[in-house]
Structures are given as structure tokens and as C-alpha cells.
Amino acid sequence: MAGYLIKIRMQKRIERRLTYFLGITFAAVILLFYMVPDIHRVSLASDGDGVATYSVMDLLRSGDELYSVDTTQTAKEVEHQLRLTLPMDVDPGKVSFTEDAMSKSFELTIPGVDSSYFYDYPMVGSSDGIRELTFAHAGDMGILDITTTKIKKLSLTVEDNYVYLDFADPHDVYDAIVVVDIGHGGNDVGANQGDIYEKNINLAIGYRLLAYGAKSEYNIGFYFTRVDDDYIDLEDRVALANDLKADLFLSIHNNSTASGRMSGINGAEVMYRVSDETGRSREFAETCLNELLEALDCNSKGVVAGDNIYIIRSSEVPVALAEIGFLTNQKELDNLNDPGYQDKAAHALYKAIVKTLKNNGADLKKSIRLEEK
């Protein structure tokens, strides 16, 4: 009997302690939510400079239904996918963005907003096709990162204190799409002669081709695998062309002898995918080679089967890899380091792109960029 009573008292003691513990825990949770009502604002990540970043995807999803039944919006406004509301003292015209097709992301900068911006002015619209939205605050600038499920083109429309965002399939924006792969980069220097690296010469020519694309008289969308000294995986390079279903895929390289020693071997060579049964890869390669020979007045090394090269054999679109010259030939090395020669090579490749697109039946219209000027 005594043992039974002791057991009962111990159970009651445990129950009292458990009740006390649960009560304290519940009170602490309630107090925490009263003190920090927006606890979900807490940073999910940091960019390395201590800038807090948090996801706003849930805020957008919660606004999807609201936006669809918002009768205060005109039919024209509801056609837009996303709507940002800005404080009255913020100039909507100063909202800008950059895009990175490789990561399927956009970075919007919104001046004059603080870290609570998206809780005071929620973004509304449709989350369709959007994988993630994160917001960060640095100084007097808000930074919104948008990651989409597919490569898209972003356009901004400004009206009063609203900024509308729309995402389109690049093929609905451009008459043709070209992906330009600038070979090597980062710790992958490619061929070299002393401190002269192929990756830098490729980039110099690529920059000039980018400029020709930007001022093109035709409505062609140019996408580049890199525009800086970055290392890019081969898989990511060819994936950009395949994901975009590009009309053409061009890779810019320069050559070297197998030994890496200086020699008399010189000239331009263009590789193509033999397994492309349409024949368009070879056609593109031949056009690139002919334009390079005419512009650079250099020796021809011909068009060469390139199916042993990963990005060539993995390409699902017409592809050409241009080896513009040899770093192991002193004359060509000097030429390739000359900005004027680099520009001639870039212009030749641009002309080859346009000529091939036209030969393949692309309906190239005059660029909207020029019509707006």
C-alpha cells in the first residue's frame, strides 16, 4: 500500500512539472509573437556582406487570389503578371533590372525602400513560372531577386506609383535567338603564351560581338554564356543553347599546337557537328569560316568534324566552334592581341550569324531598338 501511495505521489509530481513546463513554453511562444509579430521576416540567408535576405514567395502566393479579384484594377493592368506598389516618394522610373539567362534569374533594384518594404507594400499577381523570390536591403536600396522556371525576357511597365512586371518567352520577343559561348574563363585559361591567355582573347572578341549584337539592325536576341572572367561548366554552356532552343549556337576559341610551342602553323578553323542531319551545323561553320577568311585575310584550316567536343556533340541546335587563330604563331598572336583585329573577327562572326539566319529562312525584321530611336 505504501509503495502504491509513493507511486501516485511521484506521478502527480511529474504531472505538475510537465504542466508547469508546458505553461512556460506556451507563454514564451505567445510573448515572442507579440514582440516579433513578423518573425517570418528573419533572414533566410546572407550575401556575405551581412545583408539580410528573405523569401517573399509566400507573400506573392497569398496575393495571387487577391489580385485576380481586385476590382480596383483596370483590365489592362490585370493583364500584367506582377505588380509592385512603390511609396509615393519613390520614382518608379528609377527601378531597374539586370538579367542572367544562365541562372534564369533577374535582379531588380528598387531605390528608397527599407527592409520591411514587401510587408508594407506587398507584391501581387501570379506566381506562375516563378521558382523563387527573395528580397534584400542594402543602404537605401531594395534588391529583389526573381528566379524563373524557364528562361524568360522581363519587361517593366510604369504607371503612377505602380511598376508592372511581365515575363515572355524569348521566341515571342525576338525573330531569332543566337547563343554565343565565349570559350574558357576563370581558372580555365585555355591555350597560352606566357601571360597571354586564350580566355582573355576570346572574351575581347566576344565583347565586340556583343556590341554588334546590341546595335544590330535586326531583331535578334543574343545570349552569352559569359561576359566576364568566369568559369562556366561545359554542361551549362550547351544547356543555355538547348534550353533556349536557339536558332544558332556559336563558340569562340583560339588555337594552339599540341606541344604549345611556337611554330609556322596558322589560320582559322571552324568545327561543326557532323551528326546534325539537317546539315545546318556544317552550313553555319562554312559561313563563319568564309567570313573570317575575308575579314582577316588569313590562312584557311577548313571546316572540321567536332563531334568529339562535348558542347558540339551535346548541342541540339545548329552549332559552330570557331578557332580564329593560333596563339603559337607569332604573327597571329600579335594580330589576336590587336583590338582592331579582334573587332574584324567579331564583325565577321556577326555577319556569318545574320547570313546563316537569312539562308535558313528566318524572318528578320528591323530591330525595335532602332525604331524607338
Image (spheres, rainbow, N blue to C red):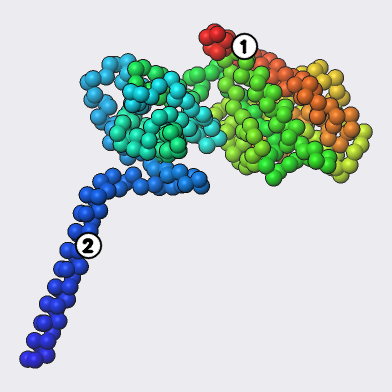
- Label 2 Cα neighbours within 10 Å, binned few <14 / some 14-19 / many ≥20: few
The residue that label 1 is drawn on is: 217
Give how far across and how far down residue 147 sits, in percent. 45, 36
Q: Residue furthest left?
A: 1
Residue under the point 51% across and 21% down = 171
Which residue is the extreme one toward the bottom? 2
The number of numbered discs placed on residues in the rendered structure image is 2
The residue labelled by disc 2 is: 25
Q: Which mark is residue 61?
A: none
Q: Nearer the viewer, residue 52 or 306?
A: 52
Q: Quadrant of residue 325?
A: top right
Q: Residues within 10 Å of mark 1 (few under 14, many from 20)?
A: some
Q: Tell me the kind of residue under disc 2.
A: Thr
In the picture, residue 346 is in which quadrant?
top right
Q: Residue at x 25, y 53 (%)?
A: 32
Residue 279 in view, yes or no: no
Could you say whether the residue bearing mark 2 is in a helix, strand or loop?
A: helix
Q: Is residue 207 left or right of residue 368?
A: right
Depth order, front residue of 135/211: 135
Q: Nearer the viewer, mark 1 or mark 2?
A: 2
Is the residue 1 above or below the residue 290 in the image?
Answer: below
Q: Identify the image quadrant of the N terminus.
A: bottom left
Residue 222: x %, y % from top left: 60, 23
Q: Which quadrant holds residue 187?
A: top right
Which amino acid, by three-letter code, is at mark 1? Glu
Q: Is residue 16 above or below residue 182?
A: below
Of residue 247 and residue 260, the one placed in the foreground of this image is 260
312 sits left or right of 118 in the view: right
Decide which of tag 1 and tag 2 comes sooner along the chain: 2
Residue 138, relative to residue 337: is it above or below? below
